[in-house]
Image: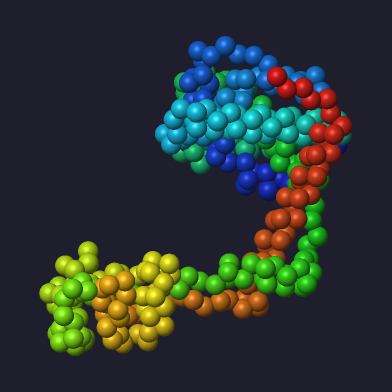
């Protein structure tokens, strides 16, 4: 038996958290009344409908709060199809692990259990056991699930290996094609007075609003929804105002008050109190983040091709 765990022990213990644990318990209780059946067969191993529902249950609860009728039905079908695909892929990976005669040492699983009890149950083993019992789950079943999770992560770490260095050309291409990712959103802190077009603005005191007077002038003369706040729009981004007003506002210096702007039959006076954003990180500043992103994309692509290879060699029947 070959020991696969040594290179990955630290990764496994750090990465297999209780984040995916809830699908093992409450989901079974919710679906207990549903008659079970075979959802798929993978090289002779059965995946049941209850396993699919157990994996999809947390997301299903969210969908039921967001959709109804045919939309909900469609979303549930898509979700369960994805859950089944994930279970099939996991089964293929575990089968590949066993085919290679790899082995996870018992102490790794025990350390994982101790970590779960320590981090999620305050070190109280009795509370952990009672939680399992309340969810009709035995300690042995839970340990088996954790062992399988460790197997999957170990195999993926073993088979999904990437180059440690991304070429400068790829980094530069990514920076050029995703330039907006490295540009912070431009925002201005805006005050604005809106005067209906039927009013005589030629001599309106609103034209002379300045400094601290802008607030009071807006309260007296403005007729938009911000008048009680002295025309304060707070921080806004582009595409908040109509295009002509946005052009004026985002091109104005901080502290400047505009002349009267005639737009769509009304009159506007704008003051920009502050602005920030709109700056772009240089390639040198973004290089490390781009390299991490490209390494993740490469790893994902390798994993997908590896899993596709396992699928191609397997007998898979879905029902």
Position in image of residue 107 (x %, y %): 69, 35
- Quadrant where the C terminus sits is top right
Q: In this view, does 17 lie above or below 286?
A: above
- In the rendered image, which quarter is residue 200 located in? bottom left
Q: Residue at x 60, y 20 (%)?
A: 50
Q: How is the image coloured?
A: rainbow
Q: What residue lies at 26% left-to-right and 73% top-to-bottom?
A: 266
Horizontal placement of 197 versus 60: left or right? left
Q: In this view, does 192 lie to the left or right of 19?
A: left
Residue 146, percent from left and from top:
64, 32
Place residue 148 in its image quadrant.
top right
Front-most of residues 85 and 233: 233
Quadrant of the rendered structure where residue 85 is? top right
Q: Tell me, yes or no, if residue 205 can be seen here.
A: yes
Label total for image: 0
Left-right relation of 3 to 25: right
Give the residue furthest to the left.
Answer: 220
Q: In this view, does 265 lie above or below 56?
A: below
> Which one is in front, 199 or 15?
199
Residue beneath the point at 28% across and 86% down: 259
Question: Is residue 158 visible to us here?
Answer: no
Q: Where is residue 66 in the image (x, y as percent from the top left)?
A: 43, 36
Q: Residue shown at 35%/85% (left/top)?
A: 254
Q: In this view, does 137 lie to the left or right of 312?
A: left
Q: Is residue 81 above or below residue 260?
A: above
- In this rendered view, identify the residue nearer to me: 196 or 257: 196
Q: Is residue 183 above or below residue 48?
A: below
Residue 227 drawn at (x, y percent)? 19, 69
Q: Quadrant of the N terminus?
A: top right
């Amino acid at each position: 038996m070959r020991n696969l765990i040594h290179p990955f022990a630290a990764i496994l213990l750090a990465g297999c958290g209780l984040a995916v644990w809830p699908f093992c318990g409450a989901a079974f209780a919710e679906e207990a009344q549903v008659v079970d059946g075979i959802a798929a067969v993978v090289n002779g191993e059965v995946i049941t409908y209850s396993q699919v529902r157990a994996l999809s249950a947390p997301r299903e609860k969210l969908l039921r709060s967001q959709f109804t009728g045919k939309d909900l039905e469609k979303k549930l079908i898509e979700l369960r199809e994805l859950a089944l695909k994930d279970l099939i892929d996991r089964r293929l990976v575990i089968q590949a692990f066993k085919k290679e005669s790899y082995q996870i040492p018992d102490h790794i699983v025990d350390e994982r259990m101790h970590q779960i009890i320590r981090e999620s149950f305050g070190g109280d083993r009795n509370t952990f056991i009672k939680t399992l019992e309340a969810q009709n789950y035995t300690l042995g079943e839970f340990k088996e699930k954790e062992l399988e999770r460790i197997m999957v992560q170990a195999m993926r770490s073993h088979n999904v290996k990437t180059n440690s260095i991304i070429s400068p050309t790829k980094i530069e291409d990514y920076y050029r094609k995703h330039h907006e990712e490295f540009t912070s959103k431009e925002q201005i802190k805006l005050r604005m007075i809106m005067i209906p077009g039927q009013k005589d603005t030629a001599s309106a005191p609103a034209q002379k609003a300045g400094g601290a007077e802008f607030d009071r002038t807006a309260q007296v003369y403005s007729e938009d929804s911000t008048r009680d706040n002295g025309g304060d729009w707070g921080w806004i981004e582009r595409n908040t105002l109509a295009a002509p007003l946005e052009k004026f506002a985002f091109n104005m210096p901080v502290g400047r008050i505009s002349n009267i702007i005639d737009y769509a039959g009304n009159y506007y006076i704008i003051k920009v109190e502050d602005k920030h954003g709109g700056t772009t990180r240089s390639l040198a500043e973004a290089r490390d983040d781009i390299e991490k992103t490209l390494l993740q994309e490469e790893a994902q692509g390798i994993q997908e091709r590896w899993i596709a290879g396992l699928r191609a060699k397997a007998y898979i029947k879905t029902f």
